[in-house]
Image (spheres, grey):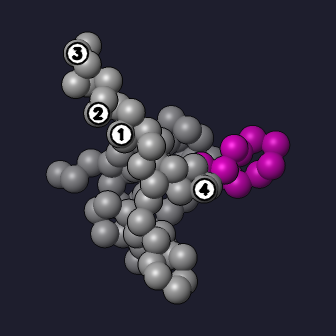
């Protein structure tokens, strides 16, 4: 791993999902919003889960590109743009 890789990983880890001005609706990097394909509850690794307090830590996965975000919008894993 090079210092460039570490910088890139840090920049990704500090990124937050964009939000629509006025509504706060999430806009994924792939263009998906909650009004389109939406987001589903998941574990930090992206596996789907029911949003139950006993088993869910508040993460969401984009249904279009599989990016994973924490409930505060922090991007945990970037999605596929293929």
Q: Which mark is residue 72?
A: 4
Outermost residue toward the right in this view = 54
Q: Earlier in the sequence, mark 1 or mark 3?
A: 3
Which residue is the site of mark 1? 11
Left or right of 3, for residue 70: right
Other-residue count near label 4 (Cα within 10 Å), few / some / many at <14 / 14–19 / ≥20: few
* Mark closer to the observer (4, 1): 1
Asked if labels 1 and 2 touch by Cβ distance under 8 angstroms, the answer is yes
Q: CA distance from mark 4 to mark 3?
A: 30 Å
The stretch drawn in magenta includes residue 52: yes
Q: Residue 39: percent from the left, percent from the top?
A: 50, 63
Quarter of the figure with residue 32 = bottom left
Q: Which residue is mark 2?
A: 8
Task: Name the front one of labels 4 and 2.
Answer: 2
Q: Position of residue 27 (x, y in %)?
A: 40, 69
- Judge from the rendering whether residue 42 lies leftward or rightward of residue 35; answer left or right: right
Residue furthest to the top: 1
Q: Is residue 23 magenta?
A: no
Q: Is residue 30 left or right of residue 59?
A: left
Rendering coords of residue 28 (x, y %): 38, 63
Say whether disc 4 or disc 1 marks the residue closer to the N-terminus: 1
Q: 15 and 65: which one is in front?
A: 15
In the image, what residue occupies the spot 53% across and 56% down?
73
Mark 2–mark 3 Cα distance, whole angstroms, equals: 10 Å
Circle 3 residue: 2
Instruction: Tell me the number on the disc at residue 54.
Output: none
Compared to 18, does 74 lie above or below? Answer: above
Q: Is residue 41 visible?
A: no
Give the CA distance from mark 1 to mark 3: 14 Å
């Amino acid at each position: 791993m090079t210092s460039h890789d570490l910088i890139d990983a840090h920049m990704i880890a500090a990124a937050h999902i964009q939000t629509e001005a006025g509504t706060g609706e999430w806009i994924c990097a792939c263009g998906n919003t909650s009004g389109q394909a939406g987001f589903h509850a998941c574990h930090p690794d992206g596996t789907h889960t029911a949003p139950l307090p006993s088993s869910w830590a508040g993460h969401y996965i984009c249904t279009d590109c599989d990016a994973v975000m924490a409930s505060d919008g922090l991007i945990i894993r970037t999605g596929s743009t293929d």
